[in-house]
Image (spheres, rainbow, N blue to C red):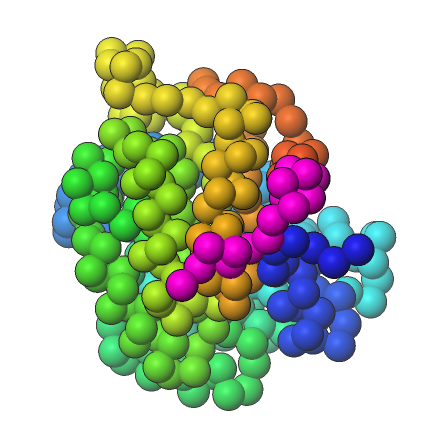
């Protein structure tokens, strides 16, 4: 049965003649929001442990992390190929030579057919874009920007230290180079109403995005946001599962139907998660969202334009 939204798996199937799997890499980078260049302490919601898989240890080299990841996945799919996903922190923040050496190390690993590079929209210098443009003519390259919100007041509140205008510019400049561009958004950041959250879909729909990742706001132990959540709980609204499912469908209805949705939900380790306490696997939540689309007889892009 055809999905009611444009799934990222369809994009990969159209792009590659074989099955591909992302392998998350922690290359030991930092962030301008942590080292004092723009700020200290990072984004208020950020605890990098919450999205770093067990095999991605910064104490290991890029090649070692790739070898571990490939060993993990190849048991089930021996003919699978891989995309090195530079996920942790800001993976375009550093000296050009250092950055490109890390990317080249990943691409030299057997079975790796491309890169996905997660970064901030204020950390993409023209020289690095030149490099990615040239590289994208030989292998698959995707740049994933952490946009998080289209409201500058929210970005300021969570200490992002960049604006939505910077996100727009980075996305447009990258797409103009013929590079696949993705965006990452968090639904439910403090102070945002449902209408404002749905307005993100309208704002993103006008940008040259190929992919979009959504996930619910998660309050993670050890973060500044956890302290705020405990001191000012009235500033937060952790969605219950049914509310979040409907929010995702409402969001997708307003989203440009050409954008591939890579995910709707994320799951931090239980020992790190303060709220929300759904205790559901990502694939279970995604199945519930797909079911809700069908119950409502609706689809991605229904109200776009």
Q: Is residue 29 visible?
A: no
Q: Which residue is painted at 30% across and 76% down in the image? A: 173
Q: At which x and y percent is residue 150?
A: 27, 50
Q: Of residues 199 and 276, which is closer to you in this image? A: 199
Q: Is residue 124 above or below residue 303?
A: below
Q: At which x and y percent is residue 85?
A: 53, 59
Q: Which residue is painted at 75% across and 66% down in the image? A: 19
What main secondary structure does the magenta stretch of the protein show?
Answer: loop
Q: Is residue 118 magenta?
A: no
Q: Is residue 217 above or below residue 59?
A: above
Q: At which x and y percent is residue 285?
A: 64, 34
Q: Of residues 198 and 107, which is closer to you in this image? A: 198
Rendered-image quadrant of the N terminus: bottom right
Q: At which x and y percent is residue 146?
A: 36, 53
* Number of numbered discs visible in the structure rendering: 0
Q: Horizontal placement of 134 versus 73: left or right?
A: left
Q: Is residue 303 magenta?
A: yes
Q: Which residue is painted at 32% across and 22% down in the image? A: 236
Q: Which residue is painted at 46% across and 20% down in the image? A: 275
Segment tinted magenta in the rendering: 290-305
Rendered-image quadrant of the C terminus: bottom left
Q: Horizontal placement of 267 versus 10: left or right?
A: left
Residue 156, quarter of picture: top left
Q: Horizontal placement of 277 versus 154: left or right?
A: right
């Amino acid at each position: 049965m055809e999905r009611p939204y444009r799934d990222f798996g369809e994009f990969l199937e159209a792009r590659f003649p074989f099955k591909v799997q992302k392998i998350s890499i922690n290359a030991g980078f930092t962030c301008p929001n942590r080292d004092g260049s723009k700020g200290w302490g990072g984004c208020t919601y950020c605890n990098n442990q919450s999205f770093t898989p067990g095999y991605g240890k910064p104490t290991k080299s890029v090649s070692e992390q790739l070898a571990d990841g490939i060993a993990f996945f190849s048991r089930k799919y021996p003919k699978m190929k891989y995309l090195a996903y530079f996920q942790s922190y800001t993976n375009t923040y550093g000296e050009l030579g250092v950055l490109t050496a890390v990317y080249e190390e990943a691409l030299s690993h057997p079975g790796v057919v491309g890169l996905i590079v997660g970064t901030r929209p204020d950390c993409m210098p023209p020289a690095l874009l030149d490099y990615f443009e040239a590289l994208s003519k030989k292998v698959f390259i995707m740049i994933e920007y952490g946009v998080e919100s289209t409201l500058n007041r929210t970005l300021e509140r969570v200490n992002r230290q960049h604006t939505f205008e910077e996100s727009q510019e980075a996305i447009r400049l990258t797409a103009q180079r013929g590079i696949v561009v993705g965006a990452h958004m968090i639904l439910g950041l403090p102070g945002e109403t449902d209408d404002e959250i749905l307005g993100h879909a309208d704002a993103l729909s006008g940008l040259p995005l190929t992919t979009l990742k959504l996930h619910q706001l998660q309050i993670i132990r050890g973060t500044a946001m956890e302290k705020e959540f405990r001191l000012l709980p009235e500033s937060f609204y952790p969605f219950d599962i049914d509310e979040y499912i409907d929010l995702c469908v409402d969001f997708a209805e307003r989203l440009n139907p050409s954008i591939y949705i890579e995910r709707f939900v994320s799951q931090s380790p239980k020992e790190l998660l303060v709220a929300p306490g759904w205790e559901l696997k990502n694939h279970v939540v995604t199945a519930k969202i797909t079911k809700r689309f069908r119950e409502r007889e609706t689809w991605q892009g229904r109200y776009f334009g």
